[in-house]
Structure formats: C-alpha cells, structure tokens
Amino acid sequence: MGILEKISEIEKEIARTQKNKATEYHLGLLKAKLAKYRAQLLEPSKSASSKGEGFDVMKSGDARVALIGFPSVGKSTFLSLMTSTASEAASYEFTTLTCIPGVIEYKGANIQLLDLPGIIEGAAQGKGRGRQVIAVARTADVVIMMLDATKGEAQRSLLEKELESVGIRLNKHKPNIYFKPKKGGGISFNSTVTLTQCSEKLVQLILHEYKIFNAEVLFREDCSPDEFIDVIVGNRVYMPCLYVYNKIDQISMEEVDRLARKPDSVVISCGMKLNLDYLLEVLWEYLALTCIYTKKRGQRPDFTDAIILRKGASVEHVCHRIHRSLASQFKYALVWVSICPRGMWPAGDPGRIRGGQMAGRPAEAAGFAGAGTPTRLPWSSGSPGRVGTPADGVCSCCPQGTSTKYSPQRVGLTHTVEHEDVIQIVKK
C-alpha cells in the first residue's frame, strides 16, 4: 500500500470515529500517523532528476506576498493592476502555468507579489503542480487567498484544507509548548495551565508513535493534540493570510456586506477596479512593515529614501541595514519624530500650541541644522483643544514617529524604533 492510500485510509477512519473520552487516545495516534505520512509525501524523491523549467523565483524587495487561489479567480488580473508586470489573463482556466513575479511600490517599500498557478483539490498530493505552488507559498511573508465571490465558501474551505495538510498554518500563532528530546531519563511532562484537550498519557502515546522515548515537555497553554504534533514535527509555517473576495460586482449588496464583515477578509472587483486602495492598506498592516528615515549631521532628513524594517526593529537593525560594520562603530543615536517636509512639526509635537500661535515649529528649533526658514502655512491659529487640523496650523498628513518622548532623544542600540522615526547615527 502506497503513502497516498495509507493517508486516505487514516482520513476515512478519523471521519467515521466518534469523538469522545473513550476514543481520544485512538484519534491522537491516528493524527500522529497522518502527520508522519504527509511529511513523507512532501519529501522529494531521490531518484527524480527532472531538468524542467525552474518554478520558484529569487526573493527580492522588502517583503514577499503569494497569490493563491483556484484557477480563473482573477489572480493574473490582480497582478497586472497592482504592478507593472503584465500577466496573461483570460476567461479560461490554467492561463498561468508558472510563477510570475511583480513588484508593488507602496509607502516607499517594494513588495514582491507572486502570481502562482491555480491549484486544484488534491494539490497536496501533487495534482496540478500543487506541491510546487505550495512550496513557493511557504516562503512568503503573507498569503493572499484569492476567492471567487460568486462561488460561496466552498473554495475557501478547500484551500485551507490543502494548505493545512502541508504544514501551512494560516492566521495562527506557534503553540507555546517547550519540547526538547533527551538521550535518557524518560519523558518528563509538566504544564503551567489546566489542560482540557491533552493529557499526559496522550502526549506519551504521540511521542512513542514518533519513536521518541526520552524528552522534556512543558505546556504553557492549553493546546490540542494537533498543535502538539506540529511542535514535534517542527517544520510548520505560521503566516498571516488575507482572504480577498473578487468579482463582487456580480453579487448582491447584501452578500458583499456579509463577506466584508468576515474576519481577515477584503472584498474587491478587479474588473471594475473597486476597493483596491483599501486592500493595499490592509496588506501593509499584515506585513507589519515600518519606515525609518535617516539624517546626516548638519543636513535635513531624507524623506525620499526610507529604510524598510519589520515592526519591533531596533537601532541595531537600522545600523545593519545601512552598513554591516556600522554597529561595531556605534556610539549613540539621535531619534526625532519626523517633521513636515514644509518645515513645520506635524500633529503630536509637545510644543504644538503656544498662546494661540502657529502649532508648527521651524526645523532649526527641533535641532535640524541647515533646514532653512520654513514657509508660514496659510492657516489660522487654532484652539489648544484641536490637534492636526488646518485651523491649528498643523499638516495632519505628515509623517511622525512615536518611539521617543523627547525630540531629539539620545538612544542606544537596543532602542525600538517606530514607524516614520528620523534617526542619526553617531560613530565612535
């Protein structure tokens, strides 16, 4: 019996087994076997030596987004609209046969968008180049699951099942379980919370199925047997997924409203170019990117070329992005909240209102030498109760950082930078 037949038999047995206290250990063993066979199925064959066209593309840009969906749902049209790459689009299925990359330029970042061929049911077993498509999807930072709004929820559940079976966990976090195999001493099991889904006996049975007889296990949260198996296997990928429903111009407004209210979902129409700007905003949040502006001593900040980093990055990450040897020569850094390119402080500056005067301050007052005298904005002075409105003399659309209390503030390598901070590195 081959691996596919074994997987099919186990899935059928799980489906017909009633879930209760008496069968939970049996179901746990079946799930452990199923995960083991699926891992074997994804391993490349040693005898295979195909010399065909390469499928994956080199990773470039600040982030990578993979487009996944069934054939003819609008992936190629979406790529052509969002990037300068022209991907062949037609009204028949399997128009795209290989991976086509494009670049989205948004907020100073270059986001690589991959148009992958449509996958079909059974892609995890290799049908329709499914393994290659899913392998590329595992390298992405965010998955956009393109769905046809006219075909209900069937596509979404099938795609989630295919990705789940190959170790891609969508919109989930890694289980907080400590697991460490040992050379001896048996299995040490502990938990810091009350477990309602797993027991010590079930954990031991699952470990024995993987031929693990000596290990240290600590549950820090209430996890299911499936999540514990994911920790044992160790090759699971946890990534955010954005469900995009295309072709909303072909369904009723009530259905559009229902789909738009679903979690992690955005409704668009590539044919009529509806809601694409909002999709980019949501995608930016899912990628968790942040822009950092640099400033040389005696000069104004460079707002035209931002450094793109992940949220939670520190000054050390900024140094490594500028030059690999800069961190070793680091003395300290000065961080400002960003100023308006017109020379005035944005909303949020501590000195925004002073006796009915203009809220904006000249760049020199903030410590930016050589900034020049700012142009007075043609706005009237406002009340201290309103911030960020034209009446306050503040350009509310200007960038501003929030990582420091004072501006400028001297910080070290471990300081966490925020979106649109201005930073100056001082070397030893």
Image: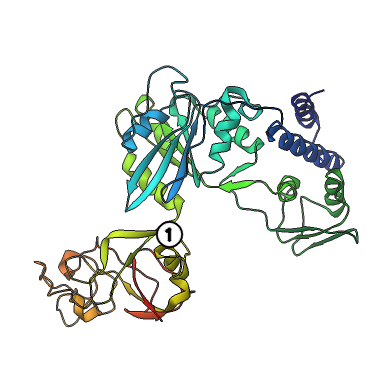
**Colouring chosen for the image of the structure:** rainbow
- Left or right of 216, for residue 291: left
Identify the element where label 1 is drawn.
strand
**Does 230 appear above or below 269?**
below
* Residue positioned 58% across, 28% down in the render: 130
Residue 87 visible (yes or no): yes
Please provide percent x and percent y for residue 336.
32, 74
Please state which of residues 187 and 61 is positioned toward the viewer in this rendering.
61
Considering every residue shown, the one lying at the far right of the view is 185
Direction top: furthest residue: 92
Q: How many marks?
A: 1
Residue displayed at 54% across by 39% down: 137
Look at the image and tell me in which quarter the N terminus lies.
top right
Q: Is residue 275 visible?
A: no
* Relative side of 279 to 354, left or right: right
Residue 46, percent across and down?
71, 32
Of 302 and 326, which appears nearest the observer?
326
For residue 334, side relative to residue 28 (left or right) = left
Q: Position of residue 129 (x, y in %)?
A: 57, 26
**Residue 85 against residue 392 in the figure, above or below:** above
Q: Nearer the viewer, residue 256 or 333?
A: 333
Determine the residue positioned at 31% across, 72% down: 337
Pick the quarter of the image with the C terminus. bottom left
Q: What's the amino acid at mark 1?
A: Leu
In the rendered view, tell whether residue 166 sits above or below residue 320: above
Q: Residues within 10 Å of mark 1 (few under 14, many from 20)?
A: many
Quarter-of-image position of residue 346: bottom left
In the image, residue 369 sits, relative to residue 43, either above or below, namely below
Residue 341: x and y in percent read 20, 65
> In the figure, is residue 245 to the left or right of 422?
right
**Disc 1 designates what residue?**
309
